[in-house]
Amino acid sequence: MSKQQSLDKIKDDIIAKNICPELAASSTQLVFGDGNIDSEIVFIGEAPGKNEDLQGLPFVGAAGKFLNEMLEGIGLKRQDVYITNIVKYRPPNNRDPLPDEKQAFLPFLRAQLEVIKPKLVATLGRHSMDCLLPGLQISKVHGQPKRYKGQVYLPLFHPAAALYNGSMRQTLIDDFAKIPRILAQIK
Ligand code: URA
């Protein structure tokens, strides 16, 4: 099976296994992931918002525009990287994803990463960090690569949180600037 076929199967499984049926019913569609499935880096956000739900793609609203700008700042285009979320359906009124919802989608996120096999997994925000790197405080560890169970992670602030907060915005931009060097150092 090709990488693309394996990813398509994970997506079909989410639907066949009726994961989070209430979220599935209240949202427009599943937002699985987007970008280069051979990328060395995968970005993981929280859950789709309104624009993502309508377009079926992650990070296409204001936070996505900011993410694209930061990628360009380090010489990458959005199409060069792979972007997804922990939770694959939009929570009603953009509420935070519930612990059960994050747990329900986690095996599928892990399966996605297993197929793509990136060198670096960049978590965007607290929710995505907590799922993959438990027990850390984002305010303390943002911008620091962490190796956990054989995978290197880079915890980052969430672009939507940083967008309108001047100091967090600059911190996120500075953390992003470290990505090329971190990637080059991963064996
Ligand atoms: N915020 C997220 O966490 N994910 C998206 O896809 C969009 C905004």
Image: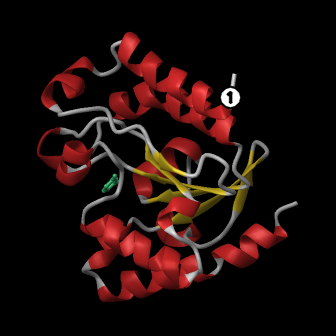
Q: Is residue 46 visible?
A: yes
Residue 31 figure quarter? top left
| Mark 1 within 8 Å of ligand 1, using the beta carbon | no
* Amino acid at dot 1: Ser
Q: Tag 1, which secondary structure?
A: loop
Residue appearing at x 26%, y 49% in the figure: 52
Q: Position of residue 36 (x, y in %)?
A: 58, 52
Q: Position of residue 24 (x, y in %)?
A: 23, 25
Residue that mark 1 sits on: 2
| Residue sticking out furthest to the right | 187
Quadrant in which ligand 1 is drawn: bottom left
Q: How many marks?
A: 1
Which residue is at the front of the view, 55 or 168? 55
Residue 184 figure quarter? bottom right
Q: Quadrant of the N terminus?
A: top right
Residue appearing at x 20%, y 53% in the figure: 51
Q: Is residue 160 visible?
A: no
Residue 11 figure quarter? top left
The answer to whether residue 33 is left or right of residue 37 is left
Mark 1 is surrounded, within 10 Å at the Cα level, by few (under 14), some (14 to 19) or many (20 or more) other residues, namely few
* Above or below, comparing residue 110 to residue 166 in the picture: above
* Above or below, comparing residue 116 to residue 20 in the picture: below
Q: Quadrant of the C terminus?
A: bottom right
* Above or below, comparing residue 163 to residue 45 in the picture: below
Which residue is at the front of the view, 75 or 118? 75
Residue appearing at x 18%, y 33% in the figure: 27
Residue appearing at x 39%, y 11% in the figure: 16
* Above or below, comparing residue 142 to residue 69 in the picture: above
Q: Position of residue 185 (x, y in %)?
A: 83, 70
Q: Position of residue 146 (x, y in %)?
A: 70, 60
